[in-house]
Amino acid sequence: MSITDGMSDHQMIITTVNARPKVIKNKPRKIYQYKKGNMENVKEYLNSKFNNFKEKITEMNIEEYWTLFKTHLFQAMDLHIPSKNLTSRFNLPWVNQHIKKMIRKKDRLYKVAKKYQTKEHWDKFKQYRKAIKTELNLSHKEYIFVMLEVRPSTSEASTNTQDQYRIGKKYWKYIKSKKRETVGVSTLKVNGETIDSSKGKAEALNAQFQSIEMVQRRAARFIKSNYSREPGTVTTLLEELKLTPLETRRKIARITLFHKAIHEKVAIPIPSHILKPRRTSRLHQPNTKKDMYKSGQTKIFTNTAFFPRTIRDWNKLPDELLEIESSEEFKTKLTQLLCSG
């Protein structure tokens, strides 16, 4: 990602996006078999290593102290407790030997149809492929029903499905495995270098956000040719130049987007728990408690989320501004109001 000069006083952000889907495979996970471990040897090993452990507390900081403790502990576990690696299964559990045999036969039919290129061979291949799909669907449904744990019914005449089956842990594990999105920040590329580690991603994003905030502050120093390091210098320069702070710009953009959502000019639905009184343009949310907004017993938004944060700013605006329907006029008046103060 890089920033270059754009049109007028704007800057243009150039970035490279990798649109190729990335398959994230689970790494083998090492687990210790504590029941098979020799705990007496573990205790003897730790006693020998931690004999003068308390005396070293004045020689090291807390990080070095913890690292030493962790190193000795894992050494004892590796020496006296057996371990094994758990790997994930990449095959589908409902594809049994019968279906695998049918798939191999389908592949043979495809090779024959591709070789002779006759309608008879292609029809035979397509018909068999359709039969495999049907068999796969039936096997998949049977696999799902097996994961539903049977609950004994209290009444013999009960036919309610809820009385017959109970959704267990295996079922939810299967549902979780079907998700397609990944959690977290994907791989970043900074100055031609690919960053995979969590620490590297955090440092790269932090540097990027700090650079955006510093653009305006450096511009103020350049315009005034004032590079003094005294506290409050940049703040004074921004006030003299009357440059709109980035925080105010974000606030204007946020309230303008909320205005468009209210007037249905953008596809952002207003949640049902946000109430609008009949005789005023103010908005409010019921059941406010500390920093959480609740609807019944369900936590919905925090105080810094878009709707609660924007509604507080919205309700502070004058009535004549809230009655404007044109988004362009509303943004102009809002900018004049916030920048004048």
Image: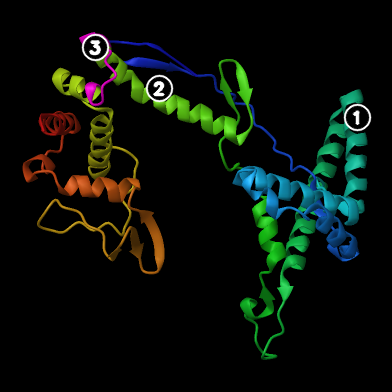
Residue type, numbered disc 2: Ser
Q: Which mark is residue 93?
A: none
Estimate the spatial distance between the alpha carbons at disc 2 and disc 1, rounded to whole Å: 59 Å
Secondary element at tag 2: helix
Would you place residue 241 above or below residue 284 in this image?
A: above
Q: Nearer the viewer, residue 118 or 233?
A: 233
Q: How many other residues sit within 10 Å of disc 1, few (<14), some (14-19) or many (≥20)? A: few
Residue type, numbered disc 3: Asn
Secondary element at tag 1: helix
Residue type, numbered disc 1: Lys
Estimate the spatial distance between the alpha carbons at disc 3 and disc 1, rounded to whole Å: 77 Å
Q: Position of residue 56 (x, y in %)?
A: 69, 48
Which circle's residue, 2 or 1, is located before the other in the chain?
A: 1
Q: Which mark is residue 111?
A: 1
Q: Position of residue 204 (x, y in %)?
A: 52, 27
State the count of labels.
3
Residue to which mark 2 is pinned:
211
Would you place residue 73 above or below residue 142 in this image?
A: above
Q: Which mark is residue 226?
A: 3
Q: Residue furthest left?
A: 320
Of tags 3 and 1, the one toward the viewer is 3
Res. 9 visible in picture? no
Estimate the spatial distance between the alpha carbons at disc 3 and disc 2, rounded to whole Å: 19 Å
Q: Nearer the viewer, residue 123 or 169?
A: 169
The residue shown at (46%, 26%) is 207
Magenta residues, dominant SS class:
loop
Mark 3 vs 1: CB contact within 8 A: no
The residue shown at (62%, 19%) is 193
Q: Which residues are magenta?
A: 222-233
